[in-house]
Amino acid sequence: MNEILEKIALCVEFGKINKVSPYPPNMKDQDGADELTRQALDGGVRPDEILENALVPAMAKVGDKFSRKEIYVPQMLMAAKAMNSAMAHLKPFFQSGETKRKGKFIVGTVAGDLHDIGKNLVAMMIEGGGWEVIDLGVDVGTDKFMSALDANPGAVIGLSALLTTTMENMKQTVTAIKEKHKHSKILVGGAPVTMEYCQKIGADFYSPDPQGAVNYLKALVS
Amino acid sequence: MTNAKFQYAFSDLGITVSHIESILGYDENGESEIIQFLIDEALKEAEQYCNIRAEYRIYNEVILSNPDKSLTINNIQFNIQKIVFNQLKKTESVAVFVCTAGGEIVKKSREVMMEGDPIKGYILDVIGSVVVDVAADLMQDALAKSVIQSGQKITNRYSPGYCGWNVGEQHKLFYLIPENFCGIRLTESALMDPVKSASGIIGIGEHVKYSKYTCSYCDMKDCTYRNLKDEKEERRKGNKY
Ligand code: B12
């Protein structure tokens, strides 16, 4: 692998955002994901190579470490921030269509629920998996999911809920979406949700952590 | 034994860096200096975003029914289920409580996240959760002290949504407290607004008991909070856990 891609991947994995960021201490005063991505692009590395060969694998490592409880939310957030600083340089290429992402992922916390930390983590990790994420926020009713899906046909949906009461609303949303868009894939998650519940309400996949969702999405398009 | 209302200052709670660190998952040996630094900074700031209140009402008219594992308070029947029922078996009165850190801390947390500092935002969010928990501990200690005079003891606190008790029963619980108690509003989906709030009941009686190791009753094996309280208690006593 190209040396600079390896360096970018390391920066993302360990949350080195840019040169001035003090974290991690052993990378102090070195260029971070921000500068290195700029340099790579200026040096002629293709944006899709940066995405696929540096950012995506680095974020997968981060997600796996989180699933194995080797790192915790703060480190995952640092990695995501480093990834975002690299992503910012790639945005123009996404917009022009020169670089394509794997697909679109619409995510939201279901109606009646205001919990968003878990959903935000999932959104970040899926973006780091090379997907375009459309985050509808919290307390999202079925109608809003439907119109987002109408506007982005073929997008995968992710639903989050943190209470058993609001988990019920998940069921309504899944039923309505499946009625209209039979082949849409729906992922569900949040503290009280289980694989059993996922199957019961007719959703396609449940994961207790973000990386499980990333791996499922990866398998969908490969 | 009377109803009581509390307003706490952030400093009353005595929340330490290592407490937040352990909730985040890190052990006390200081795995990460930067995390400790960030927590320290966030703790200094968090004070101004918290409006910490707790309140309880005492009800003496309680009926326990073993066949359906229910508890009736003032004619309102709660299906508290087996685990909670067993802990409340000998209860003579019940304190219904709510407790909150206020709405500002989450608002600030999300603002900071949006401004590009997700780590600080997350730490503020976690501080909000810990504030609710510690404030409820203080309220509970005060209740214990007030009932001891009449030779009574208290149980642990039990909340709708835990130990099999359906969170939908929050609606019934809120019948027992005045509207806008501590500024908390219950939404149709049984969610309290502000989010950093907790509600529940505490049993009171001559023969009730407080159990130390409550985590083992719960099914959430992966919970980050699992056993933390138990560990804290043991460490305070100087035992290795
Ligand atoms: C901290 C906490 C609190 C705090 C803060 C609340 C908050 N969320 O801000 C306080 C103390 C205030 C609190 C209060 C209550 N809580 Co509480 N709380 C928790 C706790 C311990 C952690 C929640 C958390 O922040 N997790 C961290 C985040 C990052 O995790 P997460 O949101 O679950 O997301 C992860 C995964 O679920 C997944 N994921 C999430 N969404 C999605 C979506 C997709 C598509 C995928 C693939 C994955 C995915 O990925 C994320 C990252 O790994 C959980 C138990 C637990 N261990 O989860 C209980 C828990 C959520 N609470 C619970 C309950 C019952 C309550 C109360 C109702 C109790 C009460 N009566 O007072 C209140 C309700 C508060 C309210 N506003 O109405 C129950 C809910 C279950 C239920 N029965 O409905 C839980 C599960 C505890 C339990 N053992 O039963 N709580």
Image (tube, rainbow, N blue to C red):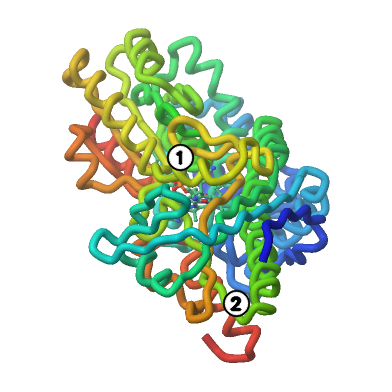
Horizontal and vertical percent for residue B30? 67, 71
Quarter of the rendering containing residue A221? top left
Q: Is residue A166 above or below residue B169?
A: above
> Could you give the CA–CA distance between mark 2 and mark 1, rounded to whole angstroms?
33 Å
| Residue A84: % across, % down | 58, 33
Give the residue at mark 1.
B171
Q: Position of A178 compared to B162: left or right?
A: left
Residue drawn 55% across the image and 58% down it: B59
Q: Nearer the viewer, residue B13 or B89?
A: B89
Residue at 41% x, 46% y is B167
Closer mark to the observer between disc 2 and disc 1: 1
Q: Chain of mark 1?
A: B
Q: Using the image, tell me which numbered label, if any, was put on residue B232.
A: 2
Identify the amino acid type marked 2.
Answer: Lys
Residue drawn where x is 57% and y is 77% of the image: B153
Residue B72 is left or right of residue A15, and the answer is left
What subunit carries mark 2? B
Residues tagged 2 and 1 counted as in contact (Cβ below 8 A)? no
Circle 1 SS class: helix
Label whose residue precedes the other's in the sequence (2 or 1): 1
The image quadrant where one finds the N terminus of chain A is top left
Q: In the image, residue A152 lies at what x, y percent?
A: 35, 12
